[in-house]
């Protein structure tokens, strides 16, 4: 690919490099769900041969016999692959994803040590690692390799700085073009995903890492990034910028829907019972998934999810009473008490939100669902439900 070789060598024309040139390539988000966060890799240009090798930490094998089970348990195995740079870039060119290259101004010894470490890491017996979406992914591996090469300067300069983002806000921002993926992150992440991130932590997103590297200075004051330019144009939708969650609109929707439930009770009570059973069934399924993530997997950022107070596992126990209402019969007395408990849990969630120093950011779900639970408790929880 002549265009790619020219891009690699043009800025270095007429300059003799005794050591390898090392750069970071950053790929913009793609359209498949595992491409939404973008990607990056390290490229090493051999000064003797002119060959460029891409060291890409983002390879996984879905054909492995236990791949699905590992994915569900949160025990995924990724690996580092060394391949010709042109071959690696051809994939992103065909997908229409933009790619930028940042050449690093490393000392010769540091560049050689980094190139040797990458080559050793890419050997089959060393290539695999346990992948974590936020803590140990393709971008954090690139970040850590660079930090070692510059003696910790990268971490020192960005660890104390923050944009105020969180794992949740970054995940939802990048997943926003895919509504189901966005919803999955919002419902599935627990309180540990809401702590403010330093720019070091934020570098789990490749584009954030590229931003931070532009500001890094080496010990003698030189910029870490010597040269930067575009390898491939981005032909897809641009990276999402994110936006604040306006909980007021969610609260308004909750009040309107809750009022609609009260209206249905007076006019079409069996329809209300059918809708309630549908909602309780959905809540029960989501609660089961949240409990499984918490108690049965290593997805630590989904543990102790406060959304369990909103999508309550107790909703499963309301279904027999809902069936009685649907048939025009009066449920047992415990049904009323259970409705009141389920309705009280969003109130507990609201208190936990306001009293916590670092709360789980789910106020929009609280204000949406609290009026719904309250409306059903008002209808059927105050006294024995009358025959329909």
Image (cartoon, rainbow, N blue to C red):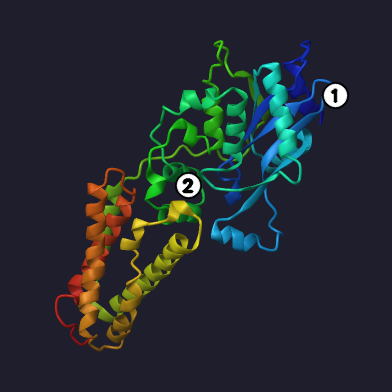
Residue 2 picture quarter: top right
Q: Is residue 170 visible?
A: yes
Q: Which mark is residue 49?
A: 1
* Secondary structure under the numbered disc 2 in the rendered image: loop
Query: Badge 2, how many Cα within 10 Å: few under 14, some, many 20+?
Result: some
Locate the C terminus and report the quarter of the image it occupies. Answer: bottom left
Q: Residue at x 46, y 56 (%)?
A: 184
**Which numbered disc, 1 or 2, marks the residue closer to the eye?**
1
Looking at the picture, does residue 325 appear above or below residue 151?
A: below
Q: Position of residue 287 (x, y in %)?
A: 39, 66
Q: Position of residue 281 (x, y in %)?
A: 39, 73
Q: Is residue 274 visible?
A: no
Q: Residue at x 61, y 44 (%)?
A: 30
* Secondary structure under the numbered disc 1 in the rendered image: loop
Locate the N terminus and report the quarter of the image it occupies. Answer: top right
Return the residue found at the far left.
383
Q: Residue at x 80, y 20 (%)?
A: 47
State the residue in front, 13 or 301. Answer: 301
- Identify the mark nearer the N-term, 1 or 2: 1
CA distance separating discs 1 and 2: 44 Å
Residue 85 picture quarter: top right
Return the residue found at the far right.
49
Q: Position of residue 183 (x, y in %)?
A: 44, 55
Residue under label 2, please give it. 176
């Amino acid at each position: 690919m002549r265009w790619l070789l020219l891009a690699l060598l043009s800025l270095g024309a007429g300059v003799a490099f005794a050591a390898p040139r090392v750069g970071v390539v950053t790929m913009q988000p793609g359209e498949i769900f595992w491409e939404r966060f973008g990607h990056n890799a390290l490229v090493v240009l051999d000064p003797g041969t002119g060959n460029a090798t891409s060291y890409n930490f983002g390879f996984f094998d879905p054909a492995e016999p236990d791949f699905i089970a590992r994915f569900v348990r949160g025990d995924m195995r990724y690996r580092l692959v060394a391949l010709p740079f042109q071959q690696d870039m051809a994939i992103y060119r065909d997908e229409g994803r933009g790619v930028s290259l940042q050449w690093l101004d490393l000392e010769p010894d540091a560049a050689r040590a980094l190139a040797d470490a990458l080559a050793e890491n890419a050997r089959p017996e060393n290539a695999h690692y346990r992948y974590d979406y936020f803590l140990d992914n393709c971008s954090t591996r690139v970040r850590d390799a660079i930090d070692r090469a510059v003696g910790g300067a990268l971490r020192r300069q960005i660890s104390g700085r923050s944009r105020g983002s969180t794992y949740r806000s970054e995940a939802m921002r990048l997943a926003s073009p895919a509504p189901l993926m966005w919803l999955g992150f919002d419902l599935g992440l627990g309180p540990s995903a809401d702590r403010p991130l330093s720019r070091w932590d934020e570098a789990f997103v490749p584009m954030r890492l590229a931003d931070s590297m532009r500001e890094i200075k080496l010990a003698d004051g030189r910029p870490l990034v010597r040269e930067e330019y575009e390898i491939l144009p981005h032909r897809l939708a641009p990276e999402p910028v994110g936006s604040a969650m306006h909980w007021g609109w969610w609260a308004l929707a909750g009040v309107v829907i809750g009022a609609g439930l009260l209206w249905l009770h007076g006019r079409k009570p069996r329809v209300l019972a059918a809708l309630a059973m549908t909602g309780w069934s959905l809540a029960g399924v989501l609660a089961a998934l949240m409990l499984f993530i918490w108690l049965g997997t290593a997805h630590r950022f989904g543990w102790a999810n406060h959304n369990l107070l909103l999508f309550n596992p107790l909703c499963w126990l309301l279904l027999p009473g809902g069936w009685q209402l649907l048939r025009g019969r009066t449920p047992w007395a415990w049904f009323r008490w259970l409705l009141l408990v389920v309705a009280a849990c969003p109130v507990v969630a609201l208190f936990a939100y306001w009293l916590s120093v670092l709360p789980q950011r789910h106020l929009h779900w609280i204000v949406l669902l609290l009026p719904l639970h309250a409306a059903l408790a008002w209808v059927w929880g105050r006294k024995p439900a009358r025959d329909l």
